[in-house]
């Protein structure tokens, strides 16, 4: 059995795109999964899909061309991964907004997946979004879309031909919209509580409005969080499935 040098170059480029993709997708993007595990998953997937990948190695005949193609594959893999991560960025934004509105911003906890300290509600929503992501089997669709990316942008095709920046910026803007929509009931709740206690403070001057409103805000916020969990999960599920379509649209040649 003879292995040509071109086949080795193709496999290395497939592995680079796959490895960059596993650096950014949910669950694998944090510090909880060791780097060796990420490399092992990327290696296994690249070995499986390598025989099916079309390639054009016209500029890989010299060292500079090979380096240029490798950088191109890193950009494609990270772009696809960041498109999927947009949903989780929106969830983190919603968690920060909810924590601020119900008065739990000072309550921090360590998120072992990301290796950072976030508000407790943010960490809770992040774990919940991961649960929805995997239970709804969206990760299978993400892997299928990633494999299809080799048909849309074969090895050797530059991702700049797809003009992805406009679509990517639009998705970044959608993060703020989605995060605000998830937190909208809590923003309205905080507004109603502030207005109610402002009126009550004028009617009962001796009442400690601040402490009473603080307790009411936390209690009603937690009740609303439990009540709106189906709404939040619907936003997460719809946006996760939409991100799979965006993965393929963002790399379509212009």
Image (cartoon, rainbow, N blue to C red):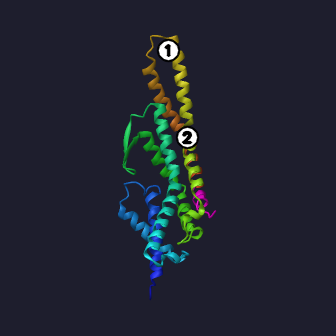
Please identify the quadrant where the N terminus is shown: bottom left
Q: Mark 1 points at which residue?
A: 201
Residue 66 spot, x, y in % from top left: 45, 73
Residue located 44% across and 88% down the image = 2
Where is 76 relative to 90, above or below?
A: below
* SS under mark 2: helix
Residue located 53% across and 24% down the image = 193
Left/right placement of residue 161 relative to residue 85 reads: right
Mark 1 → mark 2, Cα distance in angstroms: 30 Å
Q: Name the residue under label 2.
A: 182
In depth, the one of 118 and 204 nearer the eye is 118
Label 1 packing within 10 angstroms: few (<14), some (14-19), many (20+): some
In depth, the one of 90 and 220 nearer the eye is 90
Q: Is residue 251 magenta?
A: yes
* SS under mark 1: helix
On the image, which quarter does residue 107 sit in? Answer: top left
Where is 8 relative to 166, above or below?
A: below
Left/right placement of residue 202 relative to residue 254 reads: left
Question: Which region of the structure is painted magenta?
Answer: 243-254
Going from N to C along the chain, the mark reached first, 1 or 2, is: 2
Where is 161 relative to 128, above or below?
A: below
Residue 89 spot, x, y in % from top left: 49, 47
Residue 8 spot, x, y in % from top left: 44, 79
Q: Is residue 91 magenta?
A: no
- Viewer can see residue 46: no
């Amino acid at each position: 059995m003879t292995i040509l040098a071109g086949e080795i170059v193709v496999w290395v480029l497939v592995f680079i795109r796959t490895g960059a993709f596993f650096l950014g997708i949910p669950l694998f993007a944090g510090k909880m999964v060791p780097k060796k595990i990420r490399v092992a998953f990327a290696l296994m997937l690249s070995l499986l899909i390598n025989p099916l990948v079309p390639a054009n190695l016209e500029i890989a005949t010299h060292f500079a061309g090979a380096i240029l193609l490798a950088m191109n594959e890193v950009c494609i893999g990270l772009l696809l991964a960041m498109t999927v991560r947009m949903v989780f960025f929106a969830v983190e934004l919603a968690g920060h907004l909810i924590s601020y509105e119900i008065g739990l911003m000072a309550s921090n906890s360590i998120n072992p997946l990301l290796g950072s300290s976030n508000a407790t509600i943010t960490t809770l929503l992040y774990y919940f979004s991961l649960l929805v992501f995997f239970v709804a089997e969206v990760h299978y669709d993400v892997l299928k879309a990633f494999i299809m990316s080799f048909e849309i942008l074969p090895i050797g095709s530059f991702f700049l031909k797809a003009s992805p920046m406009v679509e990517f910026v639009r998705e970044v803007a959608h993060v703020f919209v989605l995060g605000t929509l998830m937190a909208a009931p809590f923003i309205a709740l905080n507004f109603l509580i502030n207005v109610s206690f402002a009126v009550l403070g004028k009617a009962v001057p001796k009442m400690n409005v601040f402490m009473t409103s603080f307790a009411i805000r936390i209690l009603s916020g937690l009740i609303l969080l439990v009540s709106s969990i189906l709404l939040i999960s619907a936003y997460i599920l719809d946006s996760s499935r939409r991100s799979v379509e965006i993965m393929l649209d963002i790399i379509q040649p212009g």
